Image (spheres, rainbow, N blue to C red):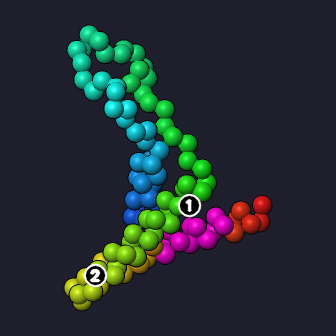
């Protein structure tokens, strides 16, 4: 963000949101969705649900999917009027793929 790299900021924000969504716990169909106010849990953390723990592989798969999604969108932006948007998506995908390459290099060196 400090470098004002808009492609990197956009790619990382989108990917962080995807990771946050992947950590969400699916709702149980049998759990009550609404009820009387007096039956509501009370206190700090009473409505908090434990988040799923993602493995390094899960995180890498999500980052890879985010990059692939951007590259797929580029293939649909063929009109000259969309050249700027396609360039931004390519730059975002490159940021994410570079992140994966750096992570793989770090894992190989460990």
Tag 2's secondary structure? loop
| Side of 63 relative to 104 (left or right) | left
How many neighbours does mark 2 have within 10 angstroms: few (below 14), some (14-19), or many (20 or more)? some
**Farthest residue, direction bottom:** 80
Q: Where is residue 102 in the image (x, y as percent from the top left)?
A: 63, 68
Q: Nearer the viewer, residue 29 or 4?
A: 29
Q: Does the magenta stretch include residue 5?
A: no
Q: Which of 103 and 31 is in front in this view?
A: 31
Is residue 31 in view?
yes
Q: Main secondary structure of the magenta part?
A: helix
Q: Position of residue 47 (x, y in %)?
A: 38, 24
Q: Earlier in the sequence, mark 1 or mark 2?
A: 1
Is residue 84 in view?
no
The tag on residue 77 is: 2
Which residue was labeled with disc 1?
60
Query: Which residues, given as a range, are shown in magenta?
Result: 94-104
Quadrant, the N terminus = bottom left
């Amino acid at each position: 963000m400090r470098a004002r790299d808009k492609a990197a900021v956009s790619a990382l924000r989108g990917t962080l949101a995807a990771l946050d969504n992947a950590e969400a716990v699916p709702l149980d169909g049998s759990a009550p969705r609404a009820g009387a106010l007096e039956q509501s849990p009370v206190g700090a953390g009473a409505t908090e649900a434990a988040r799923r723990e993602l493995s390094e592989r899960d995180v890498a798969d999500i980052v890879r999917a985010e990059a692939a999604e951007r590259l797929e969108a580029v293939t649909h932006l063929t009109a000259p009027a969309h050249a700027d948007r396609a360039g931004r998506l390519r730059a975002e995908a490159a940021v994410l793929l570079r992140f994966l390459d750096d992570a793989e290099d770090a894992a190989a060196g460990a």
